[in-house]
Amino acid sequence: MKKVHIKSFGCQMNVYDGQRMADILSEQGYEETATPEGADLILLNTCHIRDRAVQKVYTELGKLRDLKVAQKANGQHTKIVVAGCVAQAEGAEIQRRQPAVDLVVGPQAYHRLPALLAEAASRRTVDTDLPIDDKFGYLPAPTPKAIRQRGISAFVTVQEGCDKFCAFCVVPYTRGAEFSRPVAQIMTEIERLAASGVQDVTLIGQNVNAYHGEGPGHGEGPGHSQGPGGAVWGLARLMQRVAEVPGIGRIRYTTSHPRDMADDLIAAHRDLPQLMPFLHLPVQAGSDRILAAMNRKHTADEYRRLIERIRAARPDIALSSDFIVGFPGESDSDFEDTLRLVDEIGFASSYSFKYSPRPGTPAADLGEQVAPEVMSERLLRLQERIEHHRQAFNHAMVGRTVEVLLERVGRHPGQLAGKTPYLQAVQIETESNQIGDRVQVVIERAGSNSLFGRKAGPDEVPRKGLAA
Ligand code: 5AD
Ligand code: SF4
């Protein structure tokens, strides 16, 4: 068998795409290998969201060129493929900067990989079309063995692309216009995953809560509307159907835009037991002036009110966000507004980034770029606040009993590791359990990155109907 090494950078969709490419290549006689050394095909699945992510790709390509040369000296021909968002954004420029690259393939052309590899055997090849045909219809199903190797949690892309055009963001250009997969196609994929042992699915999309896929039935009732080909389903309706799949015990979705938190989606956090109490809902900034300049289409107060409604539906929900510091024109007082919002909401966790001007985005041309040292100082202060709230959230778990889904072996012998409904990592000592079990765990201690607990006794398990 030929060997392929796939390395994914960036977001969860790249992880998903990497697996789909592995499935396609598996049909071509490739098996995956964990290291680039010895691989016949090396595939970098790249991220273009910030300049640093792009620089990482070129650094990695430099190392791979050396490996390719060394393997050639041993008589092995190695092909290097660049896929993902850098491929889409930079196309042939990648091969100009790094001639060792054989093939550049954008995120909408994966299903053509076998043909492109054949073409790349004789000449350097680029395919970055954003075709309107549905690539998902061409992707092969993973084998049950591949599913089992990937574990009991899976990502499933339900939506791709974005029409929001936030002023800083490359996604509408690299992933294209918003597209929702049809309900039936998603259900086939999830049923197959569940049949091979997957219990925990995260529905993913760049703007996942804008999901509006073609589904069965008529366009009436909550979460439905009428489209040209029949009913159009919203995300809440889709998740109700996913929850009916035997074996699927946990559902999450990411990433969402505040403007697309529909009423039925908020209600699902109250009504759908499989929907986990965790929501990644990026706000980016806390100042109305900056939110407007970012083209986020909502104010800080609208976000606060939205959070109130979500918490009314699910009081214990864990919230997370992304933040950008140093967006062009951000003043000290704008930044203070962001800190205030962070303290008011009390996010369970968050990602934060320095603004990175991206070629082709509206914000890249704005004057008033913030000085790098100001950005660094703001990022540090923001991260200190985010960390404070994360620790507070984790420490508040100590003494509580929560359900943990055991997902992998733990750090030490006799330990298994899993996640709480709030997406916190937990380690427990257990002899009697195995991966895939859902166990009631008393949290005894909060470390800096994990919780530690023990199995709950029968009288420590919360009664049904009470929040865990
Ligand atoms: N600079 C910094 N951060 C960015 N993000 C997106 N574009 C940029 C940029 N140009 C961040 C946003 C987004 C997350 C995925 O990446 O916070 O939510
Ligand atoms: Fe980018 Fe998200 Fe804004 Fe879409 S909603 S443009 S993906 S930051």
Image (cartoon, grey):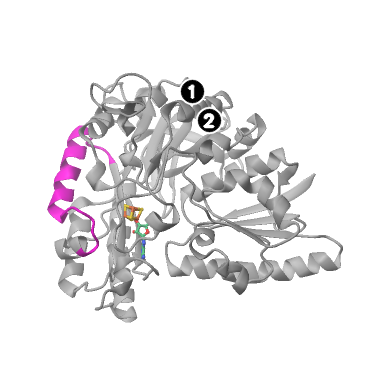
Q: Kindly identify the residue that appears in the image at 56 percent across and 32 percent down.
A: 435
- Residue 198, label in figure: 2
Q: Residue furthest right?
A: 75
Q: Is residue 213 magenta?
A: no
Q: Amino acid at mark 2?
A: Val
**Magenta segment, which residues?**
293-317
Residue 377 place in picture, x, y as percent = 30, 75
User: Looking at the image, is mark 2 or mark 1 earlier in the sequence?
Assistant: 2
Question: Which residue is nearer to you in this view: 73 or 126?
Answer: 126
Q: Quadrant of residue 50?
A: bottom left
Specify whether 270 is left or right of 81.
Answer: left
Q: Which mark is residue 247?
A: 1
In what quadrant of the picture does the N terminus appear? Answer: top right
Q: Secondary structure at mark 1?
A: loop
Q: Horizontal and vertical percent for residue 442?
A: 39, 35
Q: Is residue 234 left or right of residue 174?
A: left
Please name the residue shown 58% across and 36% down the image: 138
Q: For the point 30% across and 74% down, which residue is it?
A: 365
Judging depth in this view, the residue of 150 and 407 nearest the camera is 150
Report if the CB atoms under discs 2 and 1 are less than 8 Å apart: yes
Ligand 1 picture quarter: bottom left
Query: Can residue 286 be seen by looking at this rendering?
Result: no
* Cα separation between marks 2 and 1: 7 Å
306 magenta-colored: yes
